Image (tube, rainbow, N blue to C red):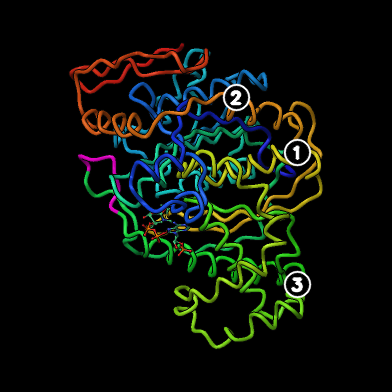
């Protein structure tokens, strides 16, 4: 089998969003803190009728329908999520309903979870399966689904929600260059969910930012080493057309790309021109620890800006609009570049950086190929239908957003309740939660 990777994609996100500008006023923080300081425009969130299960049911159903895929042709289904609902019962088992109906219960795979990394683990599992001796010729399906909510405080504006489904198989328009890869995995308490009675994480924000950048450096170094060993020449940011980052908020993405540029500067790569080299020279002596904290190193963001505009900016649309979608965040950033450039990407290399707190991270790359209808970039972009989906969202005032989160705090882990079943904003075909019975069993309906 050749060119195993992503054949098709679809995305679902809730129809409600809150504007970051309005949230700044509501929270009483300085103007620009969320919009410029974090670089975010708006944030999607689930109301009480939606959750990670309903979003994943919706996106799987629409992917199969939009690409005309027979559910019997799915042989592996992997879910990446860090939103805990039934703990030992995976979200994957919920999705089996769609396949059981067609008599297909022969589907391997369960959920993968480690903060925002689960989707990448699920993707690698599916790709490895399709490249292995246990592959039976059917498609794999990867689903990333998360609702990111934080307690009141500085982390709250970095929430978000979405679900993404990706069909996996050979001869893909988006194939993995499996030989180029770099991972960094270690033990750290930067973000975790020890309180099982609450949906909110415990987060050390500053530590999580440093961990993210340290992991990025480490993955990039390994990725470059692998590349050089195989290709016989050094890798620098000139060797990829786009860089897609896990996006908790846009400012961290700007810093991340500058960090790769800084690495290239330290490695003496020719991409760093004379002018930029002179600007960065004073920081040659910084220890890596100092370099994570140094304000002055922001000069790196400035010198990398023209390259950021071509190689990163087209990947930022959905994450800036929806916020951190945890496992779906990286793939929503990838969907943004497909939306913005579709068939102009053929022949290009796209580098992906996946980060999950705690911590797990991998840098890997995609090669973009022609693909055959319906599995072409142009068709994927048209099915993703990003502009329409973003434009038809409903802007909710911050007060309503806070009320929705309050209600969900009570509902989390609760039993014996009926939801409002208010589906006015949902598009037809969307799954929604109707009630939870005395045995904590959940019930969904389709609008
Ligand atoms: N105008 C412009 N910029 C401003 C303004 C303003 N009025 N006010 C603040 N800023 C800038 C700050 O200078 C800072 O920029 P910098 O990072 O370049 O220094 C930025 O806005 C954020 O301000 P801080 O004061 O650092 O924000 P705070 O500490 O209150 O919260 C944080 C930020 C830590 C990211 C918080 O939102 C958080 O904990 N989020 C969740 C954790 C997270 O997302 N971590 C990322 C990786 S792990 C993961 O994916 C979950």
Give the label, 3 or 2, closer to the camera.
3
**Is 239 situated above or below 117?**
below
Where residue 87 sits, quadrant-wise, is: top left
Give the overall secondary structure of the magenta segment. Answer: loop
Q: Are marks 1 and 2 in contact (CB under 8 Å)?
A: no
Q: Which residues are magenta?
A: 196-202
Q: Are marks 3 and 2 in contact (CB under 8 Å)?
A: no
- 20 inside magenta stretch: no
On the image, numbered disc 2 is attached to which residue? 63
On the image, numbered disc 3 is attached to which residue? 271
Q: Position of residue 182 (x, y in %)?
A: 58, 63
Name the residue located 53 percent from the left edge and 52 percent from the top edge.
250
Q: Are marks 3 and 1 in contact (CB under 8 Å)?
A: no
Q: Position of residue 392 (x, y in %)?
A: 56, 23
- Give the CA separation, mark 1 to mark 2: 18 Å
On the image, numbered disc 1 is attached to which residue? 342
- Give the CA separation, mark 3 to mark 2: 40 Å
Name the residue located 43 percent from the left edge and 30 percent from the top edge.
92
């Amino acid at each position: 089998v050749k060119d195993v990777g992503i054949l098709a994609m679809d995305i679902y996100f809730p129809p409600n969003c809150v504007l970051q500008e309005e949230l700044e006023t509501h929270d009483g923080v300085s103007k620009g803190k969320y919009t410029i300081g974090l670089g975010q425009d708006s944030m999607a969130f689930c109301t009480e009728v939606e959750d990670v299960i309903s979003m994943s049911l919706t996106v799987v159903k629409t992917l199969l329908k939009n690409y005309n895929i027979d559910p019997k042709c799915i042989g592996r289904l992997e879910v990446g999520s860090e939103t805990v609902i039934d703990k030992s019962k995976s979200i994957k088992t919920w999705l089996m309903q769609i396949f059981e109906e067609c008599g297909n219960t022969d589907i391997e795979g369960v959920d993968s979870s480690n903060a925002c990394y689960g989707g990448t683990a699920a993707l690698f599992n599916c790709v490895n399966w399709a490249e292995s001796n246990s592959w039976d010729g059917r498609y794999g399906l990867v689903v990333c689904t998360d609702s990111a909510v934080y307690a009141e405080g500085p982390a709250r504006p970095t929430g978000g929600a979405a679900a993404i489904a990706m069909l996996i198989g050979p001869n893909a328009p988006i194939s993995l260059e499996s030989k180029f890869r770099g991972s960094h995995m270690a033990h750290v308490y930067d973000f975790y969910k020890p309180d099982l009675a609450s949906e909110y994480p415990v987060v050390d924000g500053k530590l999580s930012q440093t961990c993210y950048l340290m992991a990025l450096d480490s993955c990039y170094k390994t990725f470059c080493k692998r590349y050089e060993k195989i290709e016989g020449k050094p890798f620098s940011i000139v060797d990829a057309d786009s860089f897609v980052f896990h996006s908790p908020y846009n400012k961290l993405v700007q810093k991340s790309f500058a960090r790769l540029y800084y690495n290239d500067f330290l490695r003496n790569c020719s991409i760093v021109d004379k002018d930029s080299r002179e600007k960065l020279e004073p920081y040659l002596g910084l220890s890596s620890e100092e370099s994570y904290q140094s304000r002055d190193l922001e000069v790196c963001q400035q010198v990398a800006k023209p390259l950021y505009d071509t190689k990163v900016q087209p990947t930022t649309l959905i994450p800036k609009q929806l916020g951190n979608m945890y496992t779906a965040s990286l793939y929503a950033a990838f969907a943004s570049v497909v939306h913005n450039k579709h068939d102009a990407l053929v022949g290009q290399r796209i580098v992906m950086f996946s980060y999950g707190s705690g911590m797990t991270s991998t840098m890997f790359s995609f090669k973009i190929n022609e693909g055959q209808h319906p599995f072409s970039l142009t068709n994927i972009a048209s099915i993703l239908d990003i502009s329409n989906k973003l434009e038809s969202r409903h802007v909710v005032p911050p007060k309503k957003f806070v009320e929705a989160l309050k209600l969900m705090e009570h509902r989390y882990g609760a039993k014996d309740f009926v939801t409002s079943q208010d589906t006015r904003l949902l598009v037809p075909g969307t799954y929604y939660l109707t009630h939870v019975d005395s045995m904590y069993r959940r019930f969904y309906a389709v609008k």
